[in-house]
Amino acid sequence: DAGVIQSPRHEVTEMGQEVTLRCKPISGHNSLFWYRQTMMRGLELLIYFNNNVPIDDSGMPEDRFSAKMPNASFSTLKIQPSEPRDSAVYFCASSLQEGLAGGPNTDTQYFGPGTRLTVL
Amino acid sequence: SQQGEEDPQALSIQEGENATMNCSYKTSINNLQWYRQNSGRGLVHLILIRSNEREKHSGRLRVTLDTSKKSSSLLITASRAADTASYFCATDYQLIWGAGTKLIIKP
């Protein structure tokens, strides 16, 4: 199994530009998570999907951030327009959640390698 | 606010010694998980302990859970240089992670 795949691995862009991060979860997993990690704030959950439906997006910082999951094998996190404070490592993770959507996640999350975003 | 908070924030020990990290959380949980993150990489799952369990072992790892104190500890015995990493705890419902404990194993 290839594990969770993220692209690009590194992204450098200028303030104001649109940034799109991509994630392919592990085949068969039904939950997908987007995280952001910085030195200052640590690891933050941005949004998570269950069966392609956004369940909790309370961690999305503001309207500049949006996430989609058009099918079970692909998700995107978009930042438009980007700002220097968005610079961070963005991780995608997936898991096989058994039980009711929105209920407790008792299953291991498998993380991708992350996308290091630098906004100049 | 964060659901899980680890302490200490940083820990430096000699190879072969035991390392203990703690995690506190704020609300009721069904389970608590510990993860490891090597520098610049994604997190890797180490162990999960359910709310009705008090202790769990996996190789050199020992996790305890005290639901009355809303705390958990991770013990790594006979530490190795390869254990150098950041360690995170995470609870289930809120999926909120602590800032992690940075563990450095000195040769």
Image: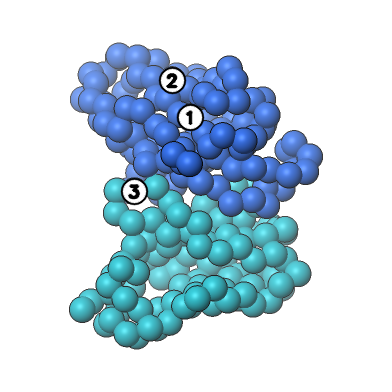
Q: Quadrant of residue B39?
A: bottom left
In the drawing, does residue B3 fall left or right of residue B27?
A: left
> Any idea which chain is the cyan one in this picture?
B
Residue placed under numbered mark 1 in the picture? A24
Q: Quadrant of residue A91?
A: top left
Residue placed under numbered mark 2 in the picture? A78
Report the Cα–Cα distance between label 3 and label 1: 17 Å
Tag 1: residue type?
A: Lys
Residue placed under numbered mark 3 in the picture? B41
Quarter of the image where the C terminus of chain A is located: top left
Q: Chain of mark 3?
A: B
Chain A, colour shown: blue
Give whichever of B48, B21 is nearer the camera.
B48
Task: Give the residue drawn at x 37%, y 38%.
Answer: A114
Give whichever of B28, A5 is nearer the camera.
A5
**Which of the two marks, 3 or 2, is nearer to us in this view?**
3
Image position, residue A16 (x, y; %): 30, 14
* Vertical placement of residue A44 versus B54, above or below: above
Image position, residue B83 (x, y; %): 34, 69
Is disc 3 in the same subunit as disc 2?
Answer: no
Give whichever of A36, A63 is nearer the camera.
A36
Report the Cα–Cα distance between label 2 and label 1: 15 Å
Tag 2: residue type?
A: Lys
**Given the current orientation, which residue lies at the most extreme front position?**
A1
Task: Give the residue drawn at x 35%, y 19%.
Answer: A19
Check whether the beta carbons of the residues at disc 3 and disc 2 lie within 8 A of each other. Answer: no
From where the camera sits, is residue B37 visible? yes
Task: Give whichever of discs 2 and 1 has the lower sequence position.
Answer: 1
Q: Chain of mark 2?
A: A
Task: Give the residue drawn at x 61%, y 55%.
Answer: B91
From where the camera sits, is residue A59 visible? no
Mark 2 Cα-neighbour bin, 10 Å: few <14, some 14–19, many ≥20:
some
